[in-house]
Image: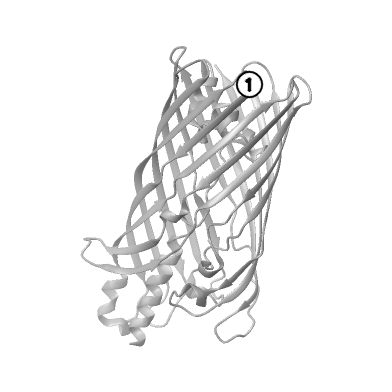
Amino acid sequence: MKKVLTITTALSVILVSADVMAAGFHLREQSAAAQGNAYAGATAGAEDNSYTYYNVAGLTRHKGTSFTGGATYIAPKATAKKVRGEDGNRDADVHNVVHAAISPNFTISHQINDRLFIGLAGNSPFGMITKYDQDWVGGDHGITSDVKTATFTPMAAYKVTDKLSLGAGMQIQYVWAHLTSSKKPYIGSVRADGDALDLGYQLGALYEFNDATRVGIGYRSEIKHKIKGDMSASTTPAMGPYHDLLNQDITVRLTTPAMLSMGAYHDINNRWAVMAEYQRVFWSSFQHLKFVSKDGGYVISQVNEKWRDTNFFAVGTSYMLDEQWKLRLGLGDDQSAVRYSHRTPRIPDSDRIWYTIGLGYQYNAQLAFNVGYTYIQAHKASLNTKLTKNPGKNVTAEYDNSIQALAFGFTYNF
């Protein structure tokens, strides 16, 4: 019985590891210009073609052929404090739980005629790296979570009238995951690796009341991934017939969430502009995660999750310092998908406030540059693994989380 419980714990560790993808780690950082305004008005602004990530219909505002490229350096800071194990004894704080990463993006667009526009975008909309010390007290709940995505979106937009534009795109999304846990009796260390390539879609509409005011709506569909990979454990001979259970090819079904965004943009005069944004992320599509044998003959293990849909609100303003320089400011409120009773060491997530500033420089008619800086202050996050009802030693902790992000982008009009 002890061996069976240990196996269940190991399987649950891997399952909990995998949900890092679906726990609210959506990377909004796909446009240096939009980042300066905390993505306020991202579905309506269409200031360069990188905004098509938020609303594909914005393609119709970009004449000729245009290329935008950029990257965002995302530096999270998460410290686990007041860590206590199952025995109630205080354990050492764990620093640098979440690791920094770079999220690249590009968009190229081309005008076919006065009505029809096409484009191709590439970005990384989901991802995270968390890593604990090998000997930390919550090791059987996970050590390393490294999840990356790459999405390519061919798209098109059509100007139905002089005021209304509609657009659509197909998301081609690749996901890769590498997950580990600490050593356990009989099992040793456990790891899982897998990847998948699946499809989704994107829709958008943009309505321009006049040259100064426009509104937009954008929708990105959920993508149902069937991740194929392998699970392995450094088992000992004492495991006997359970060795095959923990060392085999597996499949995992994982759904990334749909997102609905609505925004407004208004030029007050030739210097000042204001904008606002609302986004709903449908994390509730992720209710459970199953590990299934490669042939689908049986479910190895399952963890039920109860993520909630989240809201994101943002307001922003821009000011033209002169004919070339633009200053951007923004403020956002971001809700966590993870509630206290479902928080795990893999996902030290909480509600957060965004503070952003950006600067744009129009070098000439063809070339423009944008930089954006974000400081995200997260609320304190408490952890009690006993509440999650996942096998493993009980761990309690408090997390201090914050994120800094620096983005750079350029646009060249051919």
Residue 205: x and y in percent read 48, 29
Name the residue: 53% across, 16% down. Answer: 63
Instruction: Give the amino acid at mark 1.
Output: Leu
Residue 130: x and y in percent read 54, 61
Q: Is residue 26 above or below residue 362?
A: below
From the image, tell me which residue sits under label 1.
367
Q: Quadrant of residue 317?
A: top right
The kind of secondary structure element at disc 1 is: strand
Q: Is residue 48 above or below residue 312?
A: above
Q: Name the side, left or right, on which 237 lies relative to 17.
A: left
Quadrant into which the N terminus falls:
bottom left
Quadrant into which the C terminus falls:
top right
Residue 146: x and y in percent read 48, 57
Name the residue: 58% across, 26% down. Answer: 48
- Specify the farthest residue to the right: 321
Name the residue: 20% across, 65% down. Answer: 297
- Specify the farthest residue to the top: 114
Q: Quadrant of residue 379?
A: bottom right
Q: Is residue 86 above or below residue 288?
A: below
Residue 292: x and y in percent read 28, 63
